[in-house]
Image (cartoon, grey):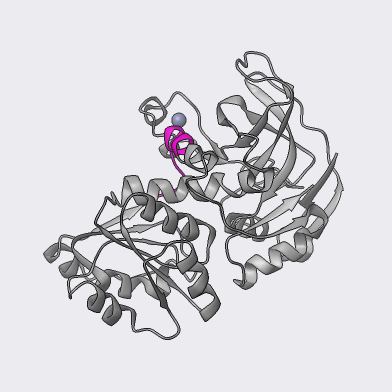
């Protein structure tokens, strides 16, 4: 089959299109004919080489897949050839204490499709049947591929980890990113007042169009002063952030007492400092999150399938242009998702 892969770690130039071995169906799995695959920042980290992640090369990336079932393995029930599906990229063992408790993203051997195992930048990919989500005809393959990773991450971050509820004020940083655009929509869906932080006049308009009540331009705003002004001096109830180092101190100062700072990424750096007096006196919570449980994935995908949440797609390109897509994502000049079509 045709696939995009890399044989060595490095920049976008290591990506190539070529022939790769066909995936072989196994017990409990299906082969999905890929119709669309969306990129994530994770694809960039994997291509550059993640310290400690021992990958077999060549590696096929791509975590976010939609397509049509082409083969069904033994012991798979409820799925047949021809079904239209989106794929949950989380991979879990199914029998550790976290999996038994329905907390799959805390699984002791948690992995991600396209990171630890061959992903979807290819004609076909093998996935566990428990990872399938049936998509209605009203949802096209591009939108279905744009949703799984970012919507499950945003759903768990906003709903479960930040515990955002109606009337809360939620600050979403890095407003143009895939998870952030999902988090803005989810915050509104849960009845929160959403403040988005982004950069540039065009992104300000785009975040407002997604439903953000207030959009701040990072390049023109004193974030802490502005947040105080719009919250009568008290600060926001919750923040979901993947910017990391560059915004960390400001984020902590933007929280009201009992506020929650939920971190799911570190695009500007991962080393931060913390004045624990500020944390304990204001009873702040710093909470990590990654991916989601199977139930959370299905809950948020149902909202996407019903049209309640709408994936934001920056552009759709043929798989052959994957280098260009990686370069664009790396440049930071992308709003929403880049989707590749094999
Ligand atoms: Zn497990």
Q: Considering the image in quadrants, where does the N terminus appear?
A: top right
Name the residue: 62% across, 37% down: 86
Residue 37 visible here: yes
Q: Position of residue 12 (x, y in %)?
A: 74, 64
| Left or right: residue 162 compared with residue 333 | left
Query: Furthest-left residue in view?
Result: 281
| Left or right: residue 283 compared with residue 44 | left
Q: Position of residue 79 (x, y in %)?
A: 64, 20
| Left or right: residue 158 compared with residue 21 | left
Q: Which residues are magenta?
A: 289-299
Q: Position of residue 257 (x, y in %)?
A: 16, 63
Q: From the viewer's perspective, is residue 209 above or below residue 156?
A: below
| Left or right: residue 333 compared with residue 243 | right
Q: From the viewer's perspective, is residue 340 above or below residue 72?
A: below
Between 25 and 214, the residue placed more toward the observer is 214
Name the residue: 66% across, 46% down: 55
Magenta span contains residue 290: yes
Name the residue: 33% across, 45% down: 160
Between 51 and 67, the residue placed more toward the observer is 67
* Callout count: 0
Q: Position of residue 121 (x, y in %)?
A: 74, 47
Between 37 and 326, the residue placed more toward the observer is 37
Query: Furthest-right residue in view?
Result: 19
Name the residue: 41% across, 51% down: 186
Q: From the viewer's perspective, is residue 50 above or below residue 275?
A: above
For ligand 1, which image quadrant applies? top left
Residue 8 visible here: no
Magenta span contains residue 267: no
Between 118 and 171, the residue placed more toward the observer is 171
């Amino acid at each position: 089959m045709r696939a995009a892969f890399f044989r060595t770690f490095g920049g976008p130039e290591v990506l190539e299109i070529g022939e790769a071995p066909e995936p072989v169906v196994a017990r409990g799995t299906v082969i999905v004919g890929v119709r669309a695959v969306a990129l994530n920042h994770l694809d960039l980290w994997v291509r550059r080489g993640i310290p400690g992640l021992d990958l077999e090369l060549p590696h096929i990336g791509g975590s976010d897949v939609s397509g049509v079932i082409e083969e069904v393995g033994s012991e798979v029930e409820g799925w047949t050839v021809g079904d239209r599906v989106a794929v949950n990229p989380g991979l879990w063992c199914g029998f550790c204490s976290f999996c038994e408790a329905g907390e799959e993203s805390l699984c002791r051997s948690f992995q991600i499709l396209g990171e630890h195992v061959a992903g979807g930048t290819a004609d076909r990919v093998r996935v566990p049947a428990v990872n399938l989500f049936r998509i209605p005809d009203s949802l096209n393959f591009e939108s279905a591929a744009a949703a799984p990773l970012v919507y499950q991450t945003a759903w768990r971050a906003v709903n479960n980890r930040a515990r955002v509820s109606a009337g809360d004020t939620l600050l979403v940083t890095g407003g143009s990113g895939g998870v952030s655009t999902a988090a803005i929509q989810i915050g509104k869906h849960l009845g929160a007042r959403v403040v988005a932080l982004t950069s540039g006049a065009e992104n300000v308009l785009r975040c407002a169009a997604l439903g953000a009540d207030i959009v701040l331009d990072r390049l023109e705003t004193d974030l802490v002063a502005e947040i105080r002004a719009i919250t009568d001096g008290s600060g926001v109830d919750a923040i979901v952030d993947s910017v990391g180092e560059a915004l960390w101190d400001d984020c902590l100062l933007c929280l009201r007492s009992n506020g929650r700072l939920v971190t799911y990424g570190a695009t500007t750096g991962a080393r931060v400092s913390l004045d624990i007096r500020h944390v304990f006196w204001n009873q702040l919570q710093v909470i990590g999150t990654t991916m989601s449980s199977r139930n959370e994935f299905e809950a948020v995908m149902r909202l996407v399938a019903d049209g309640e949440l709408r994936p934001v797609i920056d552009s759709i390109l043929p798989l052959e242009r994957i280098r260009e897509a990686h370069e664009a994502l790396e440049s930071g000049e992308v709003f929403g998702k880049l989707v590749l079509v094999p």
